[in-house]
Amino acid sequence: MTLKYYKDELKKNASALAKPGKGILAVDESTKTIGKRLSSIDVENTEDNRKAYRGMLFTTPGLDEFISGAILFEETLFQKHPDGEQMVQKLQKLGIIPGIKVDTGLRPLPGANPIETFCSGLDGLVERAADYYAQGARFAKWRAVLQITDDGCPSKLSIAENAWGLARYARSVQESGLVPIIEPEILMDGSHEIKKTALVQEEVIKAVYAACQLNGVLLEGTLLKPSMTTPGADSSQKSEPKAVAEMTIRIMERCVPASVPGIVFLSGGLSEEAASVYLNLMNGIDRKAKWNVSFSYGRALQHSCLKAWGGKDITAGQNALIARAKANSEASKGLYVAGSQPSSDEALFVAGYTY
């Protein structure tokens, strides 16, 4: 199979994922990370409990009104719901496109600062992606992580390596029919001001698209999943939500080709409410390119849901998920009224979040 063979399908699926008013549910936490989440509600990290929690998410009535796709961990993609039906079939019945996390984790980057990493998993990726496609996945996700420090991070080496890795991943999964979500995350760690974040983010995203061009990535069959442009979590110079929204859109306009159908922001440790408010403000700004500006949230969609579920209350968990999905759907159209949906304003930032 070649990229030419999948070209029309990639464009169709990317457009479906970027449908106005909808976003992506990121539920691709590793076994270790979902274990931490489950332990916070005193639920043991067993396959049955992971299956019960994710099965609750994927059978939420009406979720497809606000969610276009769901990113899965490999275990979940091949897993059956407690009722015996495949998890991917539950999503497909709702009209939600299944996706898959395809990277194999972060590794130390030789020759760089000890905190700098590259994302592994390119070996055999075309073949693995073909297996995921056969199982029902239609898009993929790969997370590169960069960090800003006072001693020069991210280095030129880190930017180049992670941009190239994202581009090689994108081309590889497109060869097997999966729409790549390209995720160059700038961690919130640090004491830097928002202007520093903007400078770094602009350099990183431009490097990513330069690498995509060299690799022949079909941009119309991709989505971008960037961080919002915020100051470091420890910065003494805090930025108002409006300033974050304006700076974020300015960076996107400078860096993201108009041929990309959608930008789905990660929440990056923002609270549920802040993630909705910032997204809403971004969608109130006139912009030159017509990409759909939406969300691909994990913690900012699941935090209240997990607590409400508590290991047993399916209805409460599903109601909480719908509330946050609806809030972010409204925010993706610039229509969210702060506080109009139940939410948590608890900060979800975790230092050095690598999952």
Image (cartoon, helix red, strand yellow):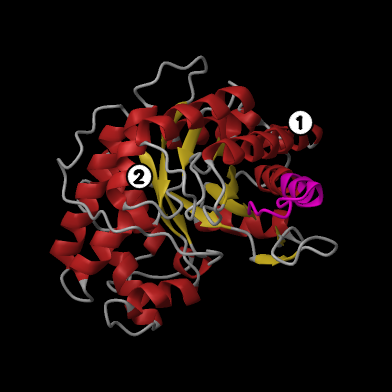
Answer above or below: position of 135 versus 254.
Answer: below
- Residue at the location (44% across, 37% down)? 17
Report the side of 207 relative to 295 (left or right). Answer: right
Residue found at the far front of this picture = 236
- Where is mark 2, residue-wise? 275
Tell me the element at label 2. helix
Amino acid tagged 1: Gln
Residue 90 is situated, as x and y percent measured from the top left of the image, at 33, 57
Q: Mark 1 touching mark 2, by CB under 8 A?
A: no
User: How would you rate the neighbour count of disc 2 (Cα within 10 Å): few for under 14, some for 14-19, many for 20 or more?
Assistant: many
Which region is colored magenta?
147-164
Q: Nearer the viewer, residue 186 or 196?
A: 196
- Between 25 and 191, the residue placed more toward the observer is 191
Q: Which mark is residue 213?
A: 1
Residue 337 coordinates in the image, percent (x, y)? 19, 33
Say which residue appears at 27% left-offset and 46% top-offset. 325
